[in-house]
Amino acid sequence: MTYNIAVLDGDGIGPEICNGAIKVLKRVGEKFGHTFNFRHLLIGGCAIDATGSPLPEETVNACLASDSVLLGAVGGYKWDNLPGDKRPEKGLLGIRKAMGLYSNIRPAKLWKSLAKASPLKYELVKDGVEIIIVRELIGGIYFGDRERGTDKNGAEYALDTEKYSVPEIERITRIACELAMKRSKKLVSVDKANVLETSRLWRKTVHEYAAKNFPEVEVTDVLVDNMAMQIVKNPAQFDVVVTSNIFGDILSDEAAQVTGSIGMLASSSLGDTARGLYEPIHGSAPDIAGKDIANPIATILAAAMMLRDSFNLTREYDAIESAIQKVLDKNIRTADIMEEGMIKVSGSVMSDLIADVI
Ligand code: NAD
């Protein structure tokens, strides 16, 4: 099969890490008989410099015409003082909106060989951890009506509104269930149904939708306060987790912290079609850009997720994941995950080694 991938390298370490992921994808193509075509497009600071806009129309059109999109990262000191609508980050929000992406999937994976990087006790994480949080991305309290005013007693007040409709909950449940079907078939839904009306509708809808459309998926409910505790108490108990925008925002950062390494975590955003946006969770790291020391693994994993979740290439996903594991097992590390007694390599050597193992 041939797949057309739009590559938004972005700023800072973006081009280096995308390069690493492309190397690995090309190797997967050779091994499994696929052709990956890459078209590089501008986004963020480099797009501002070249065109005056953080998201040129050509980029949007090419992304919409592609089979999927790989993004490095945007931003940097140079553009820090521009007004809000001219900033590199505006390009990111714009492309998510233009592609109609309403879910964000963030696997917080702690590799067995990096268990010592976790701030949690070794016994809790020694067998590895992988919590995949599926977060609703364009609804809920972040997008609800808000208001600031003064009440009849003269007190200043502020108001934010949480609102979810059944179709909004159903579509995110579909994405979570599809992912659960490719994994353990177990789904945890996180809400605050003991207090919030939106959560009660969330819980009812998740169960009804999953039972009707994905009868094999076992759905369990966890209250958000308990979830926050369980992630640090026993993170290995979770696989796929679905939740609202605000709970997902907070819990995905907590889960990422459990892994102890920002250079190893990827995320994807999906909407109604198979086309997604895949990226590392870290930023453009301007402090280390151009030095070939950035860890490419988060972006390589983002590319692997693209193969599995947009192109249904599960074997190819597994091949990349196991190649990363093998390289880590050989004690090879980039600077950010370096420990005593390990072998330190540059970012480009790390991607070469991963590609070689596939
Ligand atoms: P950052 O994630 O870029 O960097 C935080 C720290 O982690 C830095 O010390 C950096 O060197 C290190 N780091 C990040 N990725 C690494 C990697 N792959 N390998 C090794 N070390 C890595 O966050 P920041 O410093 O807060 O932001 C820098 C710029 O990135 C800002 O302009 C910010 O707006 C932007 N940003 C972009 C995105 C995105 O494009 N999705 C996300 C977050 C921040």
Image (cartoon, rainbow, N blue to C red):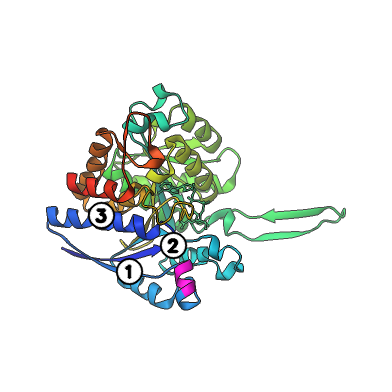
Query: In terms of sequence position, does the residue under pointer 1 or pointer 3 come before the other?
Result: 1
Q: Going from the N terminus, do you reach mark 3 or mark 2 first?
A: 2
Disc 2 marks which residue? Answer: 11
Is residue 49 left or right of 295 when viewed as pictured?
right
Circle 1 or circle 3, nearest the eye? 1
Find the distance from the CA under tag 1 to the CA under tag 3.
18 Å
**What range of the chain is rendered magenta?**
44-49
Which badge, 1 or 2, comes first in the chain's sequence?
2
Mark 1–mark 2 contact, CB under 8 Å? no
Q: Is residue 19 left or right of residue 242?
A: left
- Tell me the element at label 3: helix
Residue 262's x, y, as percent?
43, 44
The residue drawn where x is 40% and y is 70% is 42
Q: Which residue is mark 1?
A: 40
Label 3–label 2 contact, CB within 8 A: no
In the rendered view, does 160 fall on the left or right side of 213?
right
